[in-house]
Image (cartoon, rainbow, N blue to C red):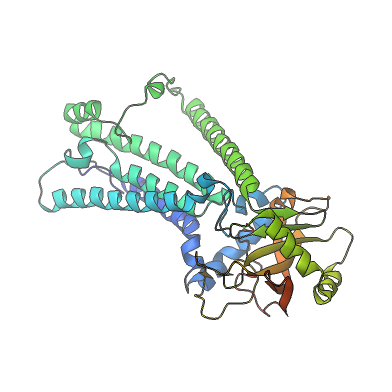
Amino acid sequence: MSTISMQPHGTSVKRAAWTVAVFYILIAFEFFYMASPFAIYFYSVCRPGLNFLNQVPGAAWLTSFFLPHIVAETSSTLVNLHNVVGAVLAILGFVTFCVGAGQVYYYRLTRKGAVTGGIYNIIRHPQYASFALCSFGLLLLWPRYIVLVMFMTMLFAYYFLAKVEERECEEKFGQSYIDYKNRTNMFLPFRIPLTEKLPNLPQSRLKKALSIAALYVLTVLVSLGLARGIQSLALDSLYALYSKDSAYISVSKIKPETMEKLVAIALANEDVQTKLGDAKDSTNTKFLNYVLPAEWYVSEIPMNVVEGSPDHFLRSDDYDKSHYKIIFTKADLRTDRHVEGKELLLNTVKRIPIVEVWLDLSQSKVNNVQNPPATMKYENTPVPVY
């Protein structure tokens, strides 16, 4: 993770940088593991920790998502673009990281001395900056709160690691490095005037440590507050239908009247009524149900695999808008208090599949009522609920 070839990285600095990077990657790359054959190995290690957090009322929010992942379309263009923006930033950050690393190692191999040209003529720590950009893209792709907390932690760690490296460079290279430092920016290609007006940290080690800790906590709290606001926007933009004991979430764009008609057709079926009745174990039983085109498959929803679908999901923009299915599940809640509407989504620990109903909208009838699969791909693993 070197930022400039003339920096004499200490073993402890390099170890800390790589530790932060690897830890973040293990968390943020969870969505890659989910879509790969390695998911079973990844979750054999991570499931206990995720389940522990998910069961603790004060910490369960860490495993939840502040942006949609299962849902393909919402009424908000901004929310719909987060995956595209995330992918672009992740790729751009990774490519920039490789460019910076290639420049450093080229100069080392050719013994041309310090790298102060190219991208290093603009910012002093392009590899830290590019990895932060890549990490932000991954955060948008896999927006768990715990990933956000680790992202903010990584930013703090990289800032102070960079400061340590710069002090080492000043001691080793003296005025030449100071001149280089004065004509370049640390992480961004432009200066932010506000940062120059911020007070310096106290000289006392204890006071400095307390100040950094307070600043870190404040920054994380502010970022969590912003994420909660984004989550509220995302929930409001879902194509959803709520009742006293149920929430119906459409994975694709759908008109409210169409969704109401589909739900009414399904609930009028005697087999569906019986299965839902058998699933009720108390007056506070809640249901979290999904509406999606008949040919679609989403692995995070406890549903039967569609023939010909890949292992993870099957979605198509060109789908039959007269054939849908509703996946009925019972919501296992982390609270005993009464919740409904969007609160049901925020308090669901896991979903217990009940029945899968295939519908023909053009004929207003149920085509098929299927039992759920015997085993779920991500059973007992905290996955997105919307």
* Total tally of numbered discs in the picture: 0
Give how far across and how far down residue 140 sits, in percent.
48, 50
Examine the image and state in which quarter residue 359 appears.
bottom right
Find the residue positioned furthest to the right: 283
Q: Is residue 279 above or below residue 76?
A: below
Foreground of the two, 258 or 94: 258
Residue 55 appears in the rendering: no
Left or right: residue 257 versus residue 316 is: right
Q: What is the quadrant of residue 50 in the picture? A: bottom right
Q: Nearer the viewer, residue 92 or 147?
A: 92
Query: Between residues 327 and 9, which one lies in front from this camera angle?
Result: 327
Q: Identify the residue at horizontal 53%, vertical 51% (top origin).
A: 143
Q: Considering the image in quadrants, where does the C terminus appear?
A: bottom right
**Left/right of residue 159 with respect to residue 49 in the rendered view:** left
For the point 38% across and 48% down, the residue is 89
**What x and y, as percent, mark residue 384?**
61, 58
With respect to residue 364, does 332 lie above or below?
A: above
Residue 44 position, x and y percent, is: 56, 70
x and y percentages locating residue 46 in the rendered image: 56, 63
Residue 347 falls left or right of residue 189: right
Q: Going 43% across and 22% down the picture, which residue do you hit? A: 203
